[in-house]
Amino acid sequence: MCGVYGIVSPVMSFENISRRLSQMGEILRHRGPDNTKNAVHSVCGNTVGMGFVRLSILDLETGMQPIHCALDDTSIICNGQIYNFIELREMVKSEPFVSKGDVEVALHLYRLNGINFLSYLNGMYAGAILDPLKNRLFLFRDRFGIKPLYYTIKKNEFIFSSEIKPLISSSGIRPEMNSHRLSTYFTYRYIPGSETMFQDIRRIPPGSFLDYDLTNGKYQVIRYWDYRLDSVNDDMTIDDAADRFYELFTDAVKIRLRSDVEVGSLVSGGIDSSAVSSQAALNQPAIRLFSMGFEEEKYNELHNVKNFLAANPVKFNSAKLNTQICRKNHLKYLPEIIRSLEEPVSLGTLLPTDMVCEMAAKQVKVVLTGEGADEIFAGYRKFMIESAASRFTHLTKKKQNELRLIFPELNTYLAQRKIDPADRYIQNEALFTSDEILKLTGQRPPLNLFSGDALPFLKGNEDPVNQAIAFETRFRLPDYVVLRLDRLSMRHSLEARTPLLDYRLAEFAATLPVRLKVDLESVREKYICSYSYLKYNILDHETAYRRKQPFTIPMADWLARPDTLPDFLQDILLGDVIRRQGILDPKYARTLVGKITTRGIGPETLVSVADQVFAIIIFTLWYQEFFSDAIF
């Protein structure tokens, strides 16, 4: 895992570009502590600098970047891993290789196929290709945006980087808040789409590339891959689906174990991280496992992890489980975490994710994780609610009454359910109502909370559950789930690999009938995953059919007593910091703090007053971190 960065300038000298590249590389050293390399080119009247910081995982001796091909002067830098590089190398084996790793394979694929080379790659990647013969610079990002890539234009300079801080530093311009996305943050707890909370700093969207014309400085962003859910195979049986899932899943894990350094695995009480760890242990019996727990018993899943390992003694006989407890006093690390995230993201998984990555990084450089299955295979309760609501009028009275008992929130959802799938997504995700956001920020949210380039591909004939999945995979997955994983793993110089986001598994999931994802009869989400894990002995029965528990902190328990929190949090909750910043209403924030309750609140609670207060804390810390006089 690594970091990439670059500058295109029509006026800057080689020396100045080199100096600024070095500054950007220093800021990204946590992503690549093993080595740094910069290269500067002159193309079509522009000075083009490309830089790379390296965390050595594959091809330890010859894999340094940028990689240059002398035949046509093309160059590549790429953050990530291309897992199928061994198979792809056969397609370009006659080309003049100077390395043995994965990234040069991508460069030669580009040289032979143009930008269409992206369709061959299976992995997580974000990078740039400089093509002097075409006077083009291409930036590209993987299908689900597992690896990040940002860009900005300042003073006629085009600047890009794996993270935001190098863009701020190298532009020499004080950052500005993208204030019209404030209500978007307080709706979703993060910013979906290509915009960020920094004015004029944007992301390359998932499954997209940016084509920069070096002759005139113009560029366009183009999607090369859409996640389509409009071609469902309604005739697929559960056993046929399980067989195909197993085939794809086992290969996804296998190719993600390709490494020249040891690979560990993060494991929680959930079925997906357990399944990934189980499959990895077949290939690597002495695998190191890493897990987090809590002192608050209803949030603690360590006993589930230990029961899972005990139920599979042969498979995990040589495995080593490493555990740690996440406690209230760990809230003191929030400022550091937010500095690493760079964007306000206010879900409770931040703290335990950071801690488990820190623990793992002390022993290994690479871990496997279970992220992605909940989004592409419908693993959240909201998908069950959507399935029940969309089928409700076609069910018998008896079944309707059963669903009302199982899902107490169903009646309310049915009464308020929106017709448009985008409106339904907002309805299911909203942390604050429009009126609450007006009280907090003084701004009423715009009618359109989505930027157009963030909208998923929908023809309109998709099942409502698949429509919800389309939004989930275009918004929450890249802009919260994997953003959090990338930043917090790389903060500790740890590479995190996600087998369940193998694009082949995702495209297979898109063809499944909804009944194989969400089973209303047995009230099971991710039905095909559980069924396949059990059928092929990847998981024991108890683990395979364990009810999902969100991986989050005891937020209400921790925030209900502000006087026991670190001083910097007390300053926020009392309103002093909020008043000085002048962005949010301190009186309304204090009112919310006084309403925090632990009654009826547990890990399954999706929206509570404590969640609202946590979002205010995160935003306030973010604003304090990035809009002070700090030097990046």
Image (cartoon, rainbow, N blue to C red):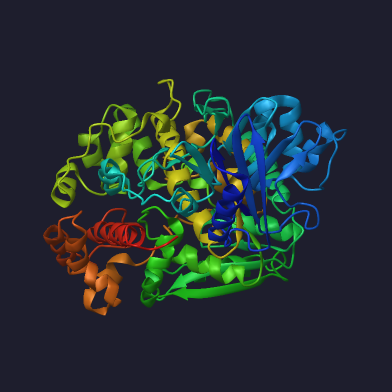
Task: Return the residue nearer the eye: 20 or 52.
Answer: 20
Residue found 49% across the figure and 53% down from its top: 166
Q: Among all residues in the image, which is located at the extreme bottom?
A: 564
x then y, percent, for residue 40: 66, 44
x then y, percent, for residue 273: 57, 57
x then y, percent, for residue 422: 33, 31
Q: Is residue 95 above or below residue 337?
A: above
x then y, percent, for residue 326: 44, 73
Image quadrant of residue 141? top right
Image quadrant of residue 236? top right
**Quarter in which the C terminus is drawn:** bottom left
Residue found 38% across the figure and 44% down from its top: 196
Q: Is residue 398 visible?
A: no
Q: Is residue 493 visible?
A: yes
Image quadrant of residue 121? top right
Number of labels in the image equals: 0
Q: Is residue 181 above or below residue 450?
A: below
**Quarter in which the N terminus is drawn:** bottom right
Q: Is residue 297 above or below residue 505?
A: below
Task: Return the residue nearer the eye: 525 or 570.
Answer: 570
Task: Return the residue nearer the eye: 434 or 31.
Answer: 31
